[in-house]
Amino acid sequence: YEEAGLVVPSARSQGGFRHYTEADVARLMIIRRMKPLGFTLDEMRSLLETTDRLDAGGTTPGEQAELVARLRDFEAAARQRVVDLRVRLARAEEFAARLSARLPGPADEDPRDG
């Protein structure tokens, strides 16, 4: 994520280890939550820029409204992706149950197989 410019460590140790502030960790957590929902790096970058600008303040009322609208769009997209994942999960669970139903039960197993 550092190469993509999403999270830049606040400092580095003499040994080259990255040091992150609480704000850096918060950014990483946003990315971590967006990734399983299938958001692209560009979408992650856009959301982080939006939240950064909202947090910084100093925006005009029009800019503030635009940023809030973008945030609402991301929220709606996240909710839709959660719905899509739930549908996929239900299908996967149904598939696993069908496979399980096809397996022989303990009474159906051949004792010579054990």
Image (cartoon, rainbow, N blue to C red):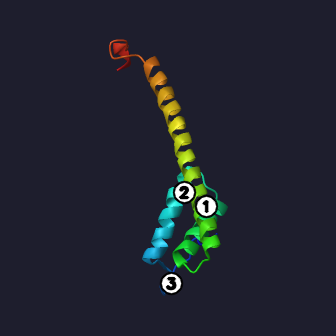
Asked whether residue 1 appears in the rendered view, the answer is no
Where disc 1 sits, the SS reads helix
Amino acid type indicated by mark 3: Ala
Q: Is residue 96 above or below residue 64?
A: above
Where disc 3 sits, the SS reads strand
Tag nearer the camera, 2 or 3: 2
Asked whether residue 37 appears in the rendered view, the answer is yes
Amino acid type indicated by mark 1: Ala
* Marks 2 & 3, CB-CB < 8 Å contact: no
According to the picture, the residue beneath numbered tag 2 turns out to be: 34
CA distance separating discs 1 and 2: 18 Å
Q: What numbered label is drawn on residue 69?
A: 1
According to the picture, the residue beneath numbered tag 3 turns out to be: 11
CA distance separating discs 2 and 3: 25 Å
Q: Work out whether residue 38 or residue 114 is closer to the camera in this orientation and state it.
A: 38
CA distance separating discs 1 and 3: 34 Å
Q: Is residue 95 above or below residue 12?
A: above
Q: In percent of the image, x 61 and y 67: which residue is there?
A: 65
Q: Work out whether residue 104 or residue 72 is closer to the camera in this orientation and state it.
A: 72
